[in-house]
Every structure is written in structure tokens, then in C-alpha cells.
Image (cartoon, helix red, strand yellow):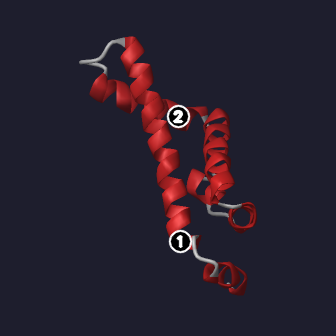
Amino acid sequence: MKTKLSHVIQSKFNIFIYLTLGWGFARFYIFSLGKLYYIFNKKEKEIINNAIADVAGRIRREIDLKEVTGRVFQGIFSHYYEKMFIAFGGHCHYRALWRD
């Protein structure tokens, strides 16, 4: 079974890292994990790039398209950061993580 980005970011080990090193570091870490994920999953990145080109490519120049694509990936990573912060931002969740 292929590992998905959400599985990587939501693994118990990574949640432990977020909770231990703080949410400032967690943002950097999640964005880094996301970039690494798409380096190793080129087909998935290509699908996203093609979708963006199909939608925005008709009205954007190539330089603008690269900027839009970069912002889309920033949005994907921000989404995961927000999701993890909402789920585990409070200290009470730290204990709950290890009860599962």
C-alpha cells in the first residue's frame, strides 16, 4: 500500500515531534515533510501540477503559473499544519495520543 502524505504527517512519531518541539518548529517540519514527500512521489506532484495548468494555464503566463503552483503547495502544507494544530494544540491531547 502506498503511503499518503496525510499518513506521514499524522503518524504518532511525527505528532510526538510536534508536541515535543513546539508548533513553531512543527510548521517548518510539516512543510519540509511535504516537500520531501513530493520529491519522492513525482507522479502525485505531476497530477497536481497538471490540474493547476489545466485550470490556470489558459489565463496565466508560465512565470505566473509557477507562482500559483508554489502557492497551491504552500496551501496544502498549511492545511496539514492547521489540521494538526487544531487536533493536538492543547496539552491534554498529548496524553490521549498514547492511550490509543
- Residue placed most toward the observer, 10 or 88: 88
Q: Does residue 74 show up?
A: yes
Q: Position of residue 8 (x, y in %)?
A: 65, 55
Query: Mark 2 — residue?
Result: 45
Residue 95 is situated, as x and y percent measured from the top left of the image, at 70, 84
Question: 19 or 11, which is in the foreground?
Answer: 19
Judged from the image, the secondary structure of the residue bearing numbered disc 1 is: helix
Where the N terminus falls, by quadrant? bottom right
Residue 81 position, x and y percent, is 54, 55
Amino acid on which the number 1 mark rests in the picture: Ala
Residue flagged by tag 2: what amino acid is it? Lys
Of residues 29 and 13, the one drawn nearer to the viewer in this rendering:
29
Residue beneath label 1, please? 87
Indicate whether 36 appears above or below 82: above
Give the residue drawn at x 31%, y 20%.
Answer: 57
Residue at x-position 66% and y-position 42%: 32
Q: Up-down: is 96 above or below 49?
A: below
Q: Is residue 99 left or right of residue 71?
A: right
Counting other residues with Cα less than 10 Å from the Cα at mark 1, is it few (<14), some (14-19), or many (20 or more)?
few
Q: Is residue 53 left or right of residue 17?
A: left
Q: Residue furthest left?
A: 59
Quarter of the rendering occupied by the C terminus: bottom right
Tag 1 and tag 2, C-beta contact below 8 Å: no
Sequence-wise, which precedes: disc 1 or disc 2?
Answer: 2
**37 versus 7 height, above or below:** above
Q: Nearer the viewer, mark 1 or mark 2?
A: 1
Measure how far apart labels 1 and 2 are at the Cα level. Answer: 26 Å
Few, some or many residues within 10 Å of mark 2 (<14, 14–19, 20+): some
Q: Residue at x 63, y 50 (%)?
A: 30
Q: How many marks?
A: 2
Residue 87, above or below 1 = below
